[in-house]
Amino acid sequence: MKAVIIGGGIAGLTMGLKLQAENWEVVICEKSFSLPNRGHAFLMHYDGLSVLSELFIDTKSHLLKQHVNLFVLRRPDNQEKIKIKLNDWYCLKRIDMISFLHSLSRLEIFIPGRSFSNFLYKNNKVVAAVFENGDIEYGDVFFGADGSNSKVRDSIFGETNFSPVEVNEIVGISKIMNRKGEHLIFQKIQSDDKGLAFGYIPTSSDEEVWFLQYDVNLSDGIEENNPESLQAFCSEMMKDFPIDVKTILDSTDFKSVYIWKTRDFDLLPSFHKENVVLIGDAAHLTLPFTSAGTTNALLDAKCLSESLREFKTIEEAFTNYYQTRVLEIQRHIDQGRLLKEIFLNPKKNNERGFLLPLMSDYNK
């Protein structure tokens, strides 16, 4: 069987590796010519890392990751509200993860510069993927791993109805020396009277990824591709926050800072149509409050590869994949929306207590 995987990010690369282990012929088609420079870093649960270890890979010695064992929530006046011990959570830089996955695959299966255009059909089934550069790739099964703005998803299900963007997230990387043991802590400073928060997570002992979340109604707009404008905006939004926030912003190169417009979409009725199947953010998108995206992409690849091995037909395999993943994905979508509601209306929702912004805490 030949698999054509559209999208060479974490979901697509992991899917390719899992299928290689099952002796499939695999071709991964990626639109970019270079490794991604957006999505600086992410939190991932060990459930995700365990998918790689199942490929008989020693992730401890090859994949750079920073263990994060404590979450602390503060208010802008520096009052500490919550301190929670974390189990099996890690912070990884996206470029490190993708470089690592590249090192495990045969280079000849990865073809860059292929931006998906459309499918070719025969008897209602896809026989080939057509790319904007004119390339055509024939195959037996096609995997849409092309992210939240998936063209493959739109091709098989029609245009996606996204939720409105109500929260923006500005993301950056800072260099901080001598944190005095704080490099294991995920810290978040969140306003208790409006939708505004600042968080930072270590990627190493002297570097951390940070994010500034804000209700879009708090801003009249910002020049997204202007580093000076971004820096001025962040400084103004954070003027009443603790001094460590200013220190982090001052140690950031704003040329690499970007704005993430957060949104999601309702759970799809299926993750496949005929011989085309979706994985990762192409299949399901949650708001970033849950830190669920990367772990879910890896678990998708594991579940789908096991289903294809276990069942005789791809229809049965794809149906099992959906049924196995659907309840957990729906919980993550619901959790993200609840966290957004609490974030946007902190005064209205203060009686709820506090919900840890990680997917594993949903039932606590």
Image (spheres, grey):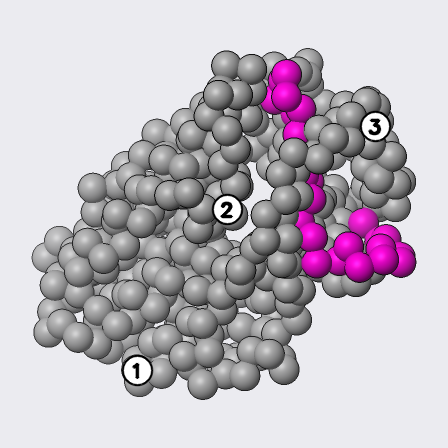
Under mark 1, the amino acid is Glu
Q: Position of residue 163 (x, y in %)?
A: 41, 27
Quadrant containing the C terminus is top left
Relative depth, front residue between 120 and 43: 43
* Mark 2 closeness class: few <14, some 14–19, many ≥20 residues within 10 Å: many
Distance CA(mark 2)–CA(mark 3): 27 Å
Start and end of the magenta stretch?
Answer: 174-199
The vertical placement of 297 against 78, above or below, is below
Distance CA(mark 2)–CA(mark 1): 32 Å
| Residue 206 placement: quadrant | bottom right
**Which residue is label 2 attached to?**
358
The vertical placement of 299 against 236, above or below, is below
**Which residue is label 3 attached to?**
235
Quadrant containing the N terminus is bottom left
In the picture, the disc for residue 22 is 1
Residue 188 is covered by the magenta coloring: yes
Q: Position of residue 182 (x, y in %)?
A: 77, 55
The vertical placement of 269 against 93, above or below, is above
Distance CA(mark 1)–CA(mark 3): 51 Å
Q: Residue at x 75, y 63 (%)?
A: 204
Sequence order check, earlier mark of 2 and 1: 1
Under mark 3, the amino acid is Ser
Relative depth, front residue between 92 and 361: 361
